[in-house]
Amino acid sequence: MEIIGVIVAGIIIGLLGKFVAPGNKDNIPIWLTILCGIGGVIIGWFVYTAFGGNGSSGVDWVRWLVAIVISAVLVVIASTVTGRNTTARR
């Protein structure tokens, strides 16, 4: 059941990461955005626990913010590496 939660959270976090990433990041496919979101959730959890995060009794907002930031970084990297060039060359 936890894997389904990571996938659903990854979709949402990936789209949020794409939204907060600087510049025009609409040149990568949606499946890559979702993969960046899933990666952001998984890597964000490891980073959060590595720096002493132990969760809270309610919603752990810091962990989700870390996941969004890492997802945004992954979206920027994916856009730089695999993005389609939308400018015309002369």
Image: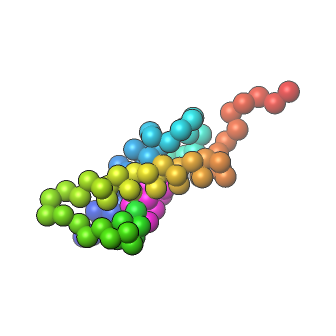
Q: Which one is nearer the viewer's eye here, 22 or 85? A: 22
Question: From the viewer's perspective, is residue 42 above or below residue 23?
Answer: below
Picture coordinates of residue 42, whole percent (x, y)? 40, 66
Residue drawn at (15%, 59%), measured in percent from left and top?
A: 58
Question: From the viewer's perspective, is residue 76 above or below residue 52?
Answer: above
Picture coordinates of residue 68, whole percent (x, y)? 40, 51
Quadrant of the frame with the C terminus: top right
Question: For the magenta stretch, what is the residue range?
Answer: 35-43
Residue 47, magenta (yes or no): no
Q: Would residue 5 appear left or right of 50 to someone viewing this image? A: left
Quadrant of the frame with the N terminus: bottom left
| Residue at the farthest front position | 52
| Residue at the farthest right position | 90
Residue drawn at (57%, 48%), measured in percent from left and top?
A: 76
Residue drawn at (72%, 30%), measured in percent from left and top?
A: 87
Q: Dominant secondary structure of the magenta stretch?
A: helix
Q: Which one is nearer the viewer's eye here, 60 or 8? A: 60
Picture coordinates of residue 66, whole percent (x, y)? 38, 56
